[in-house]
Image: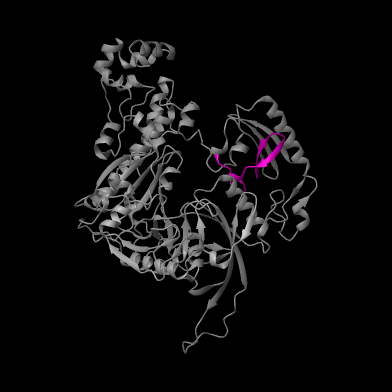
Amino acid sequence: MVYQVEGEALVPYDKYWGMQPRFEMLKPDKALVFNFGSELYVWLGKQVPPEQRVVAVRLAEERSREGFDYSECDINPLYPKVGVTAVSSRDSSDRPNWTLLAKVNQHMEPVLFREKFLDWPDDTKLIRVKKQAQEESKTAASESELKPCDAKILLQQKPEEPDLELSGSHLGRGLEYVDTIERRHYEISTLGIKVWHTTEYEHRALPKTSYGQFHSGDTYVIRWQYMVTQTGRQLTGERSRYIPTGRERCAYFFWQGRGSTVTEQGACARLTVELDEERGPHVRVLEGKEPPCFLNLFKGKMVVHKGKREVPGSSGSGWRMYFVAGEVPSEAALVEVSTPGTQHLRSRASYVILHSKSESTVDSVYLWHGAHAAKHTRDTADHASNALLEDWPEEMHLTLDSDPEIIELDEGTEPNEFWEGLGGDHKRKQHLFHSLLDSTLEYNFTPRLFHATAVSKTFEVQEILCPWRRTDVPCAYPFLQSDLYEAQQPAVLFLDNKHEMYIWQGWWPQDLLDDGVTPASSEKVRWNTTRRLAMETALHYAQESNSSNPPSVYLVFAGLEPVEFTSLFPVWEDHDDIAQIMMKEGKSQGEKRSVQETLAELTKVHYSLEELKQDPLPEGVDPRRLEAYLSDDEFETVFECTKTKFYELPVWKQNKQKERVGLF
């Protein structure tokens, strides 16, 4: 549990409540109190004023004297070895006298505190630029130890079917589960669900007609009653009478829309605890990351509207677009696009598009299929559109025409009014989005996305998987833009689209730059090492995937991505602030570079004096040791001594010399 110090009170830090602490929460202007049960810490940022520091310590001392209550938890961190039946040991008005209460200042955290964090940077494992000349060889050795990932292993890895495990039981996709080891088959039956719409201050149960109707700016709690039953057959093939009937179970999902606030998300999580009378498991579900077990609760009738339930994002006349997510009809979900337009169309997807000429009535319902939408995608879209018309939700804030007919359109057969209504021009329709209408390539594959990191002594690549993936059919759009932009920046990810590959390069966040992380820091060296290894891995991956005709590999930049790249995601929103950051570094809109050429620049050994004085510096250059990139001959001309003699000088003399020639 972690609290923020606000005024004279401790307020739960909603964003990080009930989860393992993360390094990003430690801001210089924050005063936080961490309660780990047997250890309490007052963490003080370097910008916290003295009076707030005093208040924080006092509040922490008061909290430590309040005792503890873990009666609703499965384990007591103070007495973890005591059985869960010993209720008396899980609450007390006093803490043990051996409980630790400590004050911790920013940048002076003890190891006992640091080890509590999920992603605390380990300075002993980082690639650093040594200030002392004699240590430079050690730095070079550390970098050379890092190797790219084995592309063959990445290609051989095949994702398994998603499986939600609750209370020790495997639930698979929420319908059935086959235990291949014990050779048992389990059926999962839904006994009932109940849905609450939650806000920061209140909640209310929704009528059954609103089940499955979500808003991206809201949060919801869903109570799921279910039963797991082992099935069996007699020799005659009939169901065995001796198979025990499963017991009723209960689980709570708390769904958080992408537009909901951190405060609303925290309130939703707390409400889940309050509503849980059965003490069942709680599952956090993010919009766009719903597990199939969750999707199956609504039998293909789930709709995510933009805006909030009380203040809908769409109303009145005009056009609305809904992207069809899911790979089978029972897991279908319609996701409303924030700004309807042809730029959001995708040639491997299907859309439900509504047109209203009046303020209250839907006049036309289009079911649009991309040129390379798979059969299962079209079937899922067909089910979702029919389900929408059969049980027209009041959340649409529109009424249907008497008996509207679904107008099914294939890419390339649209009438002029379709393009004009979506803000396009039928003569230029293929230029408004990355259309695959004229492509003769096959698109029966699932794209893959990998996140590359080199924080520790090993370079690692982690695949980002679609939560509702299937192993029997391809998933055309398995990941979201947020998988890129919500990664810890600066980030490097590479995307395998079979016919071409992309390496996506993130940005240096402005708050990091303001906090002293400049292009001259050791972080820049680690960043360049990560980029280099990611490029080498991607090139090897491309070669291994198709040795006779390997796909081209391109480098693209955050905020400036070309349309060929953005069209690989179901929805894409521009980020002008990030585009500005990247353009200041010399990047341009829609730019994509050859990875082979960029890697050659990144690994270049020597540069001239003029090149090293450029702003920005050449790719991959360590700004703290610019002189090392000069050739031996040019080095002697510039510094009037050999490199060996130069590095024998004291560091301050080296800096003086570098400053004299403009390399400091």
Q: Is residue 565 left or right of residue 205?
A: left
The extreme front residue here reads 358
Where 40 sits versus 243, above or below?
A: above
Q: Is residue 86 left or right of residue 263?
A: right
* Image coords of residue 172 (percent x, y): 49, 66
**Residue 328 visible in the snapshot:** no
Report which quarter residue 362 is drawn in.
bottom left
Q: Is residue 230 left or right of residue 584?
A: right
* Image coords of residue 293 (percent x, y): 50, 64
Residue 10 painted magenta: yes
| Quadrant of the rendering where the C terminus is positioned | top left
**Residue 186 visible in the snapshot:** yes
Where 345 sits versus 191, above or below?
A: above
567, 251: nearer the viewer: 567
Tell me which residue sits at (51%, 52%) in the image: 257
390, 524: nearer the viewer: 390
Tell me which residue sits at (59%, 45%) in the image: 263
* Image coords of residue 16 (percent x, y): 59, 44
Where 138 sits versus 636, above or below?
A: below
123, 303: nearer the viewer: 303
* Image coords of residue 576 (percent x, y): 39, 37
| Quadrant of the rendering where the N terminus is positioned | top right
Report which quarter residue 471 is drawn in.
bottom left
Residue 136 painted magenta: no
Q: What range is drawn magenta here? A: 1-23
Q: Is residue 86 left or right of residue 410?
A: right
Tell me which residue sits at (32%, 16%) in the image: 643
Total labels drawn: 0
